[in-house]
Image (spheres, rainbow, N blue to C red):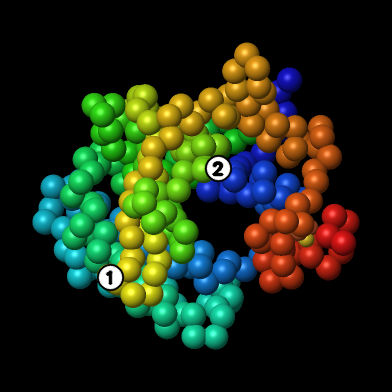
Amino acid sequence: MNREPIRIRASSFGSLFDCPARWIAIHLEGKRSPQSGKAALGTALHAGTAVFDSERVAGQLPNVGAASDAAAEKVSKIDDETIWEPGEQVKAIDVATSLTAKYCKEESMKHQFAAVEATLDSLVIKDLGLELTGTTDRVEVIGGEYGVTDIKSGKTAVGTNGIAKTHGHAAQLGIYEIVAEESTGLQITGPAQIIGLQTNLTPDKQRIGTGLIVNAREVLLGNEQHTGLLVTASKLVHGDIDPWGNPKSMMCSEVYCPNFKQCFWRR
Ligand code: SF4
């Protein structure tokens, strides 16, 4: 059945299943929702590390200072879209600067990147009535094959064993595999990877680690036993199944959910 495709950004795919009611309010009903300071720091780290890795991929001499400055500048901006706790923004500027520099000096060179921030404007999956769009952080050569790499930051992004946490990220990494294959023309057959940036305020306690997910796409596409999440996503956004709310979501708060006051599920 062909339907008018509904657009899903790859970066929002995880939040569709975190709380479908919240996702629909924001992405289909156009209700506004600010981002947390934590999310703003993540955006800044993406910006800074991308400056460094883009120069590497272009064959230029990468500049650690320019990368750190780009991260700090991003997180210094005052805007209405970000909710900062008292004192949080100043700390975030320090973390963005020091953690970007640590990534550039200690982590980046371990990776053989083929593409940095590969953007796809549109991939329509007609039979599901979905249009995928988004940006894959990196495509890199992993074990002789191309794989996607996603950069994730946060206090728990890297365990004390030095390995990036991959649990629960297969669906989103699977979407990035589809998006990256379409945007770069490269065959993505290697495992997906997360580079975790642990956002401790003290630079010598910040940890950077990696973790792999094999066959992430299967969670989306399904197999003989399971329906893939893309089919479920299509049913949700087209109203074939009723959306539900998840009051246990980390984002279930008056600040981050535009449905909070009138939510049926939060009681
Ligand atoms: S209030 Fe909570 S349960 Fe309700 S839509 Fe928002 S995040 Fe979901």
Q: Which mark is residue 168?
A: 2
Q: Image point 28% across, 33% down: which residue? A: 142
Residue nearest the observer in this picture, 61 or 203: 203
Q: Secondary structure at mark 2?
A: loop
User: In the figure, residue 260 lies in which quadrant?
Assistant: bottom right
Any part of residue 24 in sight: no
Q: Is residue 219 left or right of residue 20?
A: left
Q: Image point 69% across, 71% down: which residue? A: 255
Q: Image point 33% across, 60% down: which residue? A: 207
Residue under pointer 1 = 204
Q: Earlier in the sequence, mark 2 or mark 1?
A: 2
Q: Pinpoint residue 24: horizontal percent, then vertical percent.
A: 73, 50
The disc labelled 2 sits on which kind of residue? Gly
Q: Pinpoint residue 13: horizontal percent, then vertical percent.
A: 59, 44
The disc labelled 1 sits on which kind of residue? Asp
Q: Is residue 80 left or right of residue 4?
A: left
* Residue occupying the far front of the picture: 161
Alpha carbon distance from label 2 to label 1 = 28 Å
